[in-house]
Amino acid sequence: MTGSWPAFRIPKTLAGIALASMLFVAVSSFRCAVSAAEEPPVSPPAVEPLPDLSADLQLTAIDQNGHTSVTTAHIYRSGKLIRYEYRQADPIEVVIMDFGTLKEYRIYAEDKIYFETSFASRLSRKAQQEGLIRLEEHPDIIQNRIVLREDSLEGHPSDIVLLIRTVKDKKEFGAEYTLRWEARDLKGQALRVAYHRDNLALAIVDFQNLKLGPVDPALFQPPTGFVSMTPF
């Protein structure tokens, strides 16, 4: 494998240092393994769908200077449908994203209106990386999944996995490296995900208070009686 390896910037917080260091060591170990072999081992991707769930989602971004920003939301998931409820806002902000049709709905309950827009397919790949929807095979992407060790997170026995995804014939752009804590008793659902963003900030996604079970399909549609304000 050729191409550049990511430049790691270590954030100046204890949690950031620990996760960034772990990500760096995992990638370095993978680099050594690749140097010793013609092709890295490829694990078959999981094909079992992720279960429907509700959870508290926390996204923490830590830059190289230690500045931290935190975004929280309560989410519901069913297949490729995600409903975000930003409950710290007043009134609560609701965003529904359909990663199957690449449609987004922003709902304003007080005014009983909503807006419908389309979003780029790259956001679907990011949602896969962050554990929001199931990882999918793609003919132009080489995917390597390496189990580093066992762990426990939120009381769930988990595997810490280094996931490497590389675009075929474009390795000069580097690969995408992600650490995932995948719960064995939750059908492989990621409970924590850590990766470097394009701006070199360390992003940490945590799923907390996670509950499995059917989700009301009505949660993924604008409420009956709401008026679409989509201008086109």
Image (spheres, rainbow, N blue to C red):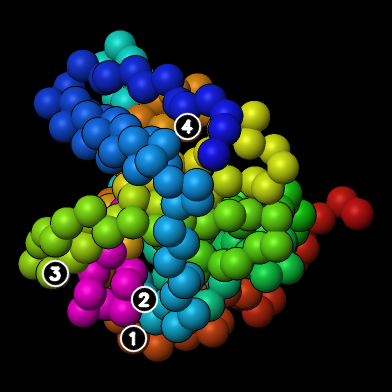
**Residue toward you, 231 or 164:** 164
> Would residue 185 be found to the left or right of residue 215 on screen?
left
Asked if labels 3 and 1 touch by Cβ distance under 8 angstroms, the answer is no
**Which label's residue is closer to the chain start, 4 or 2?**
2
Q: State which region is magenta.
A: 180-189
- Report helix, strand or loop for mark 2: strand
Of callouts 3 and 4, the N-terminal one = 3
Badge 1 amino acid: Gly
Label 3 or label 2, whichever lies nearer to me, is 3
Left or right: 42 in relation to 53:
right
Q: Nearer the viewer, mark 4 or mark 2?
A: 4
- Where is residue 202? Give x, y as percent: 35, 30
* Disc 2 residue type (three-letter): Leu
Q: In this view, does 108 lie above or below 156?
A: above
Q: Distance between the residues labelled 1 and 3?
A: 17 Å
Gap between marks 1 and 2 measured at Cα: 6 Å
Q: Quadrant of the C terminus?
A: bottom right
Q: Name the residue under label 3.
A: 156
Residue 61: give x, y in percent of width and height.
36, 31
The residue pinned by badge 2 equals 53
Q: Residue at x 57, y 72 (%)?
A: 80
Residue 183 is situated, as x and y percent measured from the top left of the image, at 23, 69
Circles 4, 1 touching at the beta carbon (< 8 Å) = no
The secondary structure type at the circle numbered 4 is loop
Neighbourhood count class around disc 2 (C-alpha, 10 Å): few under 14, some 14–19, many 20 upward: some
Q: Using the image, tell me which numbered label, if any, was put on residue 197.
A: 4
The disc, 1 or 2, on the residue closer to the chain's N-terminal end is 2
**Dot 3 amino acid type:** His
Label pair 1/2, CB-CB below 8 angstroms: yes
Q: Name the residue under label 1.
A: 213
